Image: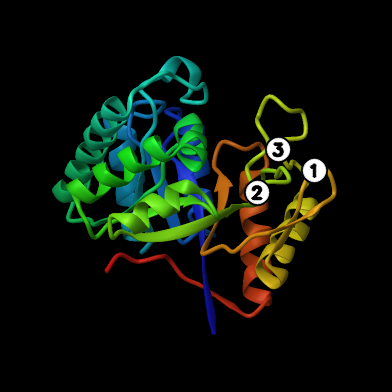
C-alpha cells in the first residue's frame, strides 16, 4: 500500500480556542510542525502541542521562521545566510529541549512562511537551512516544497527530505505557491481542495491558477492550522487519502 503523510502547522495561537482547534486537527493528521516562538507561539504552547502530539503518536516537527513576530514570519527580510543558519539552530534547540524534557522525539523540520518560500527558490538560503539542520541533527527530515531548491540542498548535505504539496494553497505555472498578496492564493472551498489533492496523489499533477498542468510529486500534504476551515479540510482530506488506497502514515526519521 502506498504511504502518504498529512501534516499541519500548529502551535501558532495562544488562546484556549486556538489550542482546542489544534487538538481537533490532531484527529486527522499524522505529522505536526510546531511554531518555535519566532513568528508565533511560546514555550508553553510548544509544550502543550508537543505533548498532545506525542500522546497521539503524531510525528513532531519544528517550524522555524525569520525572527519576525510582527509580520507572522510572512514578510521577506534581508537576513544573511549566516543569520538564517543562526535562527534555525536557535529554534531547533528550543523545541528539541521541550521534546527531550518530555521524552519525545523531534522528527522533522519545515521552514515557515517567507523563509520557506525563499528557500524554495534561493540556493544560498536553502543551503543555510539544510546545513543548520544537518549540524543540529543529521537524522532529521527536511520538509520543503516539491521540486524546490530546499530539497536539493537537503540532499546535498545528506539529509532525508520530504516533498510537500499544499491542500489549501494555489500554484503558479513554475510550481511555486501563489503569493499571499494575490487574492487567489488560498483555497477556501473544501471541494476544491479535495479535487486538487486528488489530482496530485493520483496523477502527479496540480492545475495552476492559469489553468496549466504542473507536474508535482509529494511525500506529504500540508494543511495550515490557522485556516478558517482547517478542521473541515483535514477531515475531508483524511477521508480522501484513505479512500484512494493510501496508508496515512507519518514520515519518520531514520
Front: mark 3 or 1: 1
Side of 106 where 10 appears, left or right: right
Disc nearer the start of the sequence (3/1): 3
**Mark 3 falls on what kind of element?**
loop
**Against 202, is 95 above or below?**
above
Rendering coords of residue 146 (x, y %): 55, 55
Q: Between disc 2 and disc 1, whose residue precedes? A: 2
Q: Can residue 218 be seen in this view?
A: yes
- Residue at which label 2 appears: 175
Task: Compute the Cα span from label 2 to label 1.
Answer: 11 Å
| Marks 3 and 1 close (CB-CB < 8 Å) | no
For the C terminus, give its image quadrant: bottom left
Residue 186 - label:
3
> Residue 132 at what x, y percent from top left?
25, 42
Colour scheme employed for the rendering of this structure: rainbow
Q: Say what secondary structure mark 2 lies in.
A: loop
Mark 3 or 2: in front is 2
Residue 60 shows up from this direction: no
**Nearer to me, 234 or 24:** 234
Rendered residue at 42%/54% (across/down): 152
The foreground one among 144 and 45 is 144
The residue at the point 61 percent across, 54 percent down is: 234
Mark toward the viewer: 2 or 1: 2
Q: Residue 209 carries which label?
A: 1
Task: Residue at 56%, 62% (x, y): give it.
Answer: 218
Amino acid at each position: 500500500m502506498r504511504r502518504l503523510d498529512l501534516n499541519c502547522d500548529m502551535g501558532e495561537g495562544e488562546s484556549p480556542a486556538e489550542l482546542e482547534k489544534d487538538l481537533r486537527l490532531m484527529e486527522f493528521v499524522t505529522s505536526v510542525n510546531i511554531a518555535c516562538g519566532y513568528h508565533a507561539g511560546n514555550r508553553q504552547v510548544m509544550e502543550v502541542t508537543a505533548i498532545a502530539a506525542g500522546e497521539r503518536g503524531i510525528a513532531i516537527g519544528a517550524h522555524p521562521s525569520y525572527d519576525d513576530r510582527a509580520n507572522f514570519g510572512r514578510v521577506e527580510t534581508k537576513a544573511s545566510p549566516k543569520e538564517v543558519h543562526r535562527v534555525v539552530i536557535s529554534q531547533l534547540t528550543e523545541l528539541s529541549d521541550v521534546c527531550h524534557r518530555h521524552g519525545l522525539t523531534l522528527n522533522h523540520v519545515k521552514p515557515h512562511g517567507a523563509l520557506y518560500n525563499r528557500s524554495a527558490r534561493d540556493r544560498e538560503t536553502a543551503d543555510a537551512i539544510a546545513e543548520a539542520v544537518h549540524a543540529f541533527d543529521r537524522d532529521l527530515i527536511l520538509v520543503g516544497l516539491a521540486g524546490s531548491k530546499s530539497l536539493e540542498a537537503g540532499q546535498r548535505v545528506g539529509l532525508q527530505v520530504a516533498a510537500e504539496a499544499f491542500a489549501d494553497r494555489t500554484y503558479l505555472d513554475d510550481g511555486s505557491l501563489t503569493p499571499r498578496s494575490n487574492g487567489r492564493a488560498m483555497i477556501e472551498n473544501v471541494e476544491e481542495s479535495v479535487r486538487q489533492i486528488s489530482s496530485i496523489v493520483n496523477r502527479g499533477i496540480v492545475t495552476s491558477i492559469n489553468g496549466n498542468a504542473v507536474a508535482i510529486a509529494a511525500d506529504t500534504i500540508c494543511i495550515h492550522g490557522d485556516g478558517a476551515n482547517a478542521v473541515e479540510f483535514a477531515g475531508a482530506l483524511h477521508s480522501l487519502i484513505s479512500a484512494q488506497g493510501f496508508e496515512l502514515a507519518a514520515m519518520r526519521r531514520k
